Every structure is written in structure tokens, then in C-alpha cells.
Image (tube, rainbow, N blue to C red):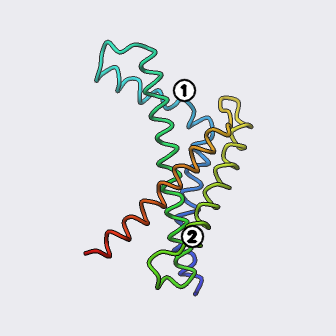
Amino acid sequence: MNVRTTLRGWLPVVFWMAVLFVASTDLGGTKHTSRILVPLLRWLVPDISRAAVNEVQLAVRKTGHTAAYALLAGLAWRARRRMVDASQPWRVNDAVFALLVATLYAASDEWHQTFTATRQGTLTDVALDVFGASLGLTAIWLWGRWRRRW
């Protein structure tokens, strides 16, 4: 394993972590994301109630958590696979490693939000992030099983 292989594996992980870090600042807060979502909802459904807008916005934000950490876990899994013998299509150790990376980053991300005036860190969001990471790793596992059948 050389430095180039290591960098090619881990740079996408570090880049995605940086994106998540910026998203956990005020820029990723409800006030900023509503600038895009609320006009879109009002254009699609002009008579939508404020309560419905809030519910949709919450659903979109929580789905974003899930997807973001599914991607992070997938990238960490890929980086780990580049560092070890990848002759086996699936190794539990690689998945556990990726899940651990995503879990630790989710916890640190939520802790980071406690220092932002417009954000709050919650254990519920950490759990949602871990769920998303698990979904991402499950999707990789299923994809690998499906590919072997063809």
C-alpha cells in the first residue's frame, strides 16, 4: 500500500466530513434550508399550511441526516477496503470499522452543533445518523450479493 492509494481512499471521506461539518454550522440550520424548501413547497402546493411546511421540512432534514451518513459509511468502507486485502467481497470487520467511523463522527458533529447558537446537538440525531450508516452498509452488502448472482 502506498501513499497515493491511501489518499485516493481517504480524501473522499475527509471531503465528505468537511461538507458535514459546514452543514452542522448555522449554514445548515433550519433558517437557511427553509429559504429553498419553503418557496418550492409553496410553488408546488400554494395553499399548504405552515404546519405542513414544518412537517415536510423536518422530514427532509431527517432524511438528509440518513442519506449523509449512509454516504459517509460507504466512503469509509471503501477507504478501508483499499487498505486491506479486498479479495473477499464482504468482510464484517470492514463494515464494523466504517460504522464506527460514522458513529464517532456523528457524535462529534452533534457535539459541534452545541457550540452554534442556532443549532442544537441531540442524541436522537446521532441515532438517526447511525441508522443511516447502517442502511448504507446494508445497501453495499445487498449490492455485492446481487452482483455475484449475475
Coordinates of residue 90 in the picture (x, y in percent): 47, 74
Residue 23 left/right relative to 40? right
Which of the 4 image quarters holds residue 2? bottom right
- Image quadrant holding the N terminus, namely bottom right
N-term mark: 2 or 1 = 2
In the picture, measured across the screen, residue 48 lies left or right of residue 114, that is left
**Vertical comparison of 94 with 123: above or below:** below
Q: Where is residue 9 in the image (x, y as percent from the top left)?
A: 53, 73
Depth check: 43 or 86 in front? Answer: 86
Q: In which quarter of the image is residue 15?
A: bottom right
In percent of the image, x 55 and y 71: which residue is there?
92
Position of residue 79 relative to residue 65, above or below, is: below
Residue 13: which quarter of the image? bottom right
**Residue carrying label 2:** 10
Helix, strand or loop status at disc 2: helix
125 relative to 138 in the view: left or right: right
At 28% from the left edge and 24% from the top edge, which residue is drawn? 44
Q: How far apart are marks 2 and 1 (CA)?
A: 32 Å
Residue at 62% of width from left, 35% of height from top? 26
Quarter that holds the C terminus: bottom left
- Disc number at residue 129? none
**Residue kind at label 2, given as amino acid type:** Trp
Residue denoted by label 1: 31
